Amino acid sequence: MTWDDVARIGLALPGVEAGTSYGTPALRVRKKFLCRAWEDLETLVLPVSGFEEREALIEAAPDVYFFTEHYRAYPTVLVRLPVATHEHVAGLLTQAWRAAAPKRLVQTFDAETK
């Protein structure tokens, strides 16, 4: 998987726009942070629902998910894109979108995808 793959997944969600964050490619939904590429462009910085979810992801697939000391205090997981699959990223990205998007946008999306 590459950043372009991540962008394709994210930009398919309503209200998502491409931009930059800390000088790297990023996605936002209605100006709220969704995810970004790390400086190496092979790692995805992605918020998760909490520290328990981050730990579970790392335990389940330590070759894909990790975090650094910098992210210890944040409910964020880092994803190694070269070994990640669509399944590793799509669900988490959609979950992050649901958390960041306005409620009305999520409701409209849910109604249209039923």
Image: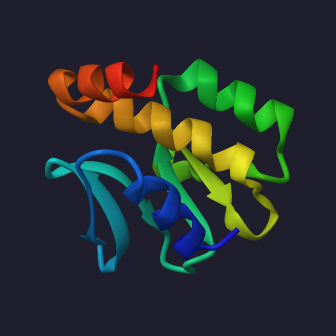
Q: Is residue 63 above or below residue 102?
A: below
Q: Is residue 4 above or below residue 44?
A: below
Indicate the quadrant containing the N terminus: top left, top right, bottom left or bottom right.
Answer: bottom right
Colour setup of the view: rainbow
Towards the viewer: 106 or 83: 106
Towards the viewer: 83 or 72: 83
Give the percent coordinates (x, y) of residue 89.
Answer: 63, 48
Q: Quadrant of residue 80?
A: bottom right
Give the percent coordinates (x, y) of residue 27.
Answer: 33, 60
Q: Is residue 55 visible?
A: yes
- For the image, the number of numbered tags is 0
Asked if residue 26 lies left or right of residue 86, the reply is: left
Give the percent coordinates (x, y) of residue 85.
Answer: 77, 55
Q: Is residue 5 above or below residue 39?
A: above
x 44%, y 27%: residue: 113
Towards the viewer: 77 or 9: 9
x 33%, y 29%: residue: 109
